[in-house]
Image (cartoon, rainbow, N blue to C red):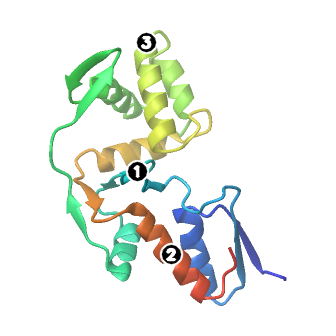
Amino acid sequence: MHFKVVIVGAGAAGLTAADEISRAGHSVAVVEARERIGGRIHTLTSPFHAEAGAEFIHGTPPATMRILEESHHNFSPVDGKIYSIYSNKFSPGDPREHEREKFVQALDKIKEDTTVARVLNTYFAKNESVHTSVKQFAEGFDAADIETMSALSLRSEWKQTDNDEQFRINGTYSALIDYLHEKITRQGCQT
């Protein structure tokens, strides 16, 4: 079969792209290397329900809000307290948050874009804890390589989401993936 567009990856971004492109009238195939769709969204259901990937909605991103509304999925604010285990110590909050705040202050000093790694090496050459904290957060949360990630883009994102409320989908994140998959299948996309 011949497709006008082939999308690599059946995560939320790939499925959403397939939706947009197929609604524009193009034939679309979505290919996925894993035996499941969803990318970083992965709900475990046995022996109990747990999110093994995405767990929160950070703020109210328009694309996510549109899909939630369209699919009739509700969401609720996250309440409770955050606790961390870091360096074998259990403590309230995230003890590394102040390290990321130092990094954001350094980002405020740059005028031209560069990589996150270059900013770390310029301002925190001898501070391994800032390096580690920023790298783990950027690569874990943003799924980005700090050697190529835009420092200005990260600054914009981290400043925008600093005070955003967080939400959880009532039900499972995989239900959103299932909704997107069913929608694109109805539109004639191949997965």
Q: Which mark is residue 47?
A: 1
Q: Is residue 153 above or below residue 134?
A: below
Kindly indicate whether the residue at mark 3 contacts the one at mark 2 (C-beta within 8 angstroms).
no
Tag nearer the camera, 2 or 1: 1
Q: Which amino acid is tagged 2?
A: Leu
Residue 80 seen anywhere in this rendered image of the structure: yes
Give me the residue at 53% from left, 44% from top.
143
Give me the residue at 31% from left, 49% from top.
161
Q: Which mark is residue 95?
A: none
Residue 97 x/y as whole percent: 29, 28
Tag nearer the camera, 2 or 3: 2
Hey, which quadrant is residue 74 in on the image? bottom left
SS label for mark 1: loop
Quadrant location of the N terminus in the rendered image: bottom right
N-term-proximal mark, 2 vs 3 = 3
- In the picture, measured across the screen, residue 96 lies left or right of residue 113, that is left
Q: Mark 3 Cα within 10 Å, few/some/many (few <14, many 20+)?
A: few
- In the picture, measured across the screen, residue 98 lies left or right of residue 154, that is left
Give me the residue at 44% from left, 42% from top.
141
Farthest residue in the left direction? Answer: 80
Residue position for label 2: 180
Residue position for label 3: 127
SS label for mark 3: loop
SS label for mark 2: helix
- In the picture, measured across the screen, residue 7 lies left or right of residue 88, that is right
Q: CA separation, marks 2 and 1?
A: 26 Å
Farthest residue in the top direction? Answer: 126
